[in-house]
Amino acid sequence: MADDPNQHPPEPKPEEKPKEKPDEENSKSSIPSEPSTPSETPTETLSETPPVPETPPPVEEYRKKLERDILAIIEEKLKNGQMDAERAKGIARLVLDKLHPPLTLEQIYQIAPTLDDHFAELAAAVLPVMQEHNEKVRTIVTQHAQKLIKLGKIDEASQVLKQAIQRESKIN
């Protein structure tokens, strides 16, 4: 009877079962099945999808908003007879040349103030961009100075604030 348990046919069956389980697991992992109920939807797979465009959508939307604002100015001026078609074409060329994607937010902040250098009517579109940038810079400088003060680095905080004031006075 000692020979019977060693030559028993159930031993190959357990070997077959582990082979089937990995195949089942592989088929489950390689072929996504739709969940039968909404509660079975894996939330982690939904949040793991990386953004495809090189330019983050908020920056691209910001660039497009600036373009739309400029376009609205052009349309209004053309409609009211305050701008001729040639000037509108010049503005359009400038915008297409300077605001081509992909751009970073910093690049937009650098380009925007130059748009009204030759076309003063664009100031209405450029001014909000400049004001937003200045406000963000002020916030960052203030936070940095506050951290330095908390660390007891009063002189460094003073220097940071002085430099910020000098830069702001040069811009304005």
Image (cartoon, grey):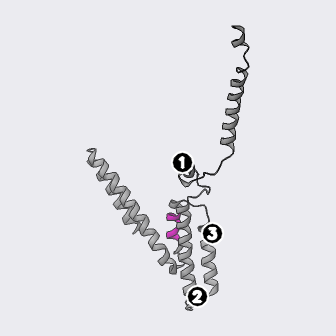
Q: Residues within 10 Å of mark 3 (few under 14, many from 20)?
A: few
Which amino acid type is marked by label 1? Glu
Read off the residue under disc 3.
97
Question: Mark 1 or 2, which is nearer the eye?
Answer: 1
Read off the residue under disc 1.
44
Q: Are marks 3 and 1 in contact (CB under 8 Å)?
A: no
Number of numbered markers:
3
Left or right of 126, for residue 162: left
| Residue 125: percent from left, percent from top | 49, 75
Q: Is residue 39 above or below residue 165?
A: above
**Which sits in the foreground, 112 or 143?**
143
Q: Quadrant of the N terminus?
A: top right
Q: Quadrant of the C terminus?
A: bottom left
The residue at the far front in this view is 1
Question: Mark 3 or 1, which is nearer the eye?
Answer: 1
| Residue 80: percent from left, percent from top | 55, 91
Q: Which residues are magenta?
A: 108-114
Residue for point 70% across, 32% down: 20
Residue 90 position by quadrant: bottom right
Residue for point 53% across, 76% down: 69
**Which sits in the foreground, 103 or 97?**
103
Q: Which mark is residue 151?
A: none
Q: CA distance from mark 2 to mark 3?
A: 21 Å
Read off the residue under disc 2.
78
Q: Is residue 67 above or below residue 84?
A: above
Residue for point 52% across, 67% down: 62
N-term-proximal mark, 2 vs 3: 2
SS of the residue under disc 3: helix
